[in-house]
Image (tube, grey):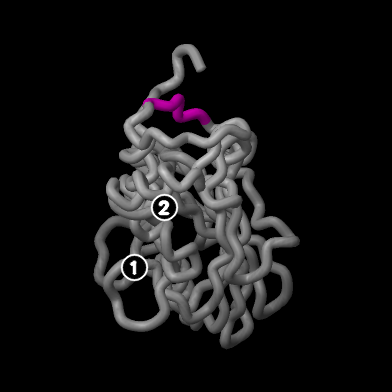
Amino acid sequence: MKGAPSSRLDKLLANLGYGSRREIAGLARAGLIRLDGQPLRDAAARIAVTPDLPARMEIDGEPVDPPPGLALLLHKPLGVTCSHKEAGPLVYALLPERWRRRDPAISTVGRLDKETSGLLLLTDDGALLHRIISPKAAVPKRYRVALDRPMRGDEVGIVASGGLLLEGEDKPLLPALLEVEDETHAAVTVTEGRYHMVRRMFAAMGNHVVGLHRDRIGALDLPADLKPGAFRPMGETEIAAVFAAG
């Protein structure tokens, strides 16, 4: 495709985690790599790397994985850690094993702690990642909160004031939106990404978060049909929605 970036077949598939270049060459010689219905037997052949490649290329009868520039939305379950190194179940284990060998690597866009569920974005696009998490972008994130004790009644004003201080910090939080659902449940929308921020907000107001679930980033909602642990690639419309409410 004119104007599209191109890559050697063996380099592309090795970077997508399909094996070493020698192993890719073996797949090609065996006729297991097909492009537009035709076998690609030359592993050194250059091909256009376009977003529609999974619809055009097959590896052993299966669509090739999405090329670099991948963005995913994932429904993070409880008990899973957003890390490559920490002990216990890791969010990356929810992805196909081959995807963990991709270069560039897939990373989470920010983190949700082990006991927080909900919408999590992942990408191998460093520019997109930094654009989303940049303080200048001020991308809002909404969390559903369950509390240990009934709220006092002044929390909405405190959160909106821009004067709430977290323990151990001397810079107050930016104004945030707190929507009360009942005396122990609320939705809070924040534009910052401080460590354990929502839990610490309510601790600073004398309460304790017992349940936390993120259901929106920007104007992108967690899809109702995406079950915990499931993920899917994001399209351009969904990526744009992340910034639509910023």
Closer-to-camera residue (39/236): 39
Magenta extent: 46-50
Location of residue 46 in the rendering, given as x and y in whole percent from the top left corner: 38, 26
Closer-to-camera residue (210/226): 226
Q: CA distance from mark 1 to mark 2?
A: 11 Å
- Residue type, numbered disc 2: Val
Residue 109 circle label: 2
Q: Is residue 205 visible?
A: no
Classify 10 Å Cα crowding around label 1: few (below 14), some (14-19), many (20 and above).
some
Location of residue 158 in the rendering, given as x and y in whole percent from the top left corner: 51, 62
- Residue type, numbered disc 1: Ser
Classify 10 Å Cα crowding around label 2: few (below 14), some (14-19), many (20 and above).
many
Q: Residue at x 44, y 53 (%)?
A: 162
- Mark 1: which secondary structure? loop
Q: Residue at x 62, y 38 (%)?
A: 55
Name the residue tied to disc 1: 83
**Side of 72 where 42 appears, left or right:** left
* Mark 1 or 2, nearer chain start: 1
**In this view, 59 is above or below 93:** above
Location of residue 87 in the rendering, given as x and y in whole percent from the top left corner: 31, 81
Q: Residue at x 63, y 47 (%)?
A: 220
Q: Is residue 78 visible?
A: yes
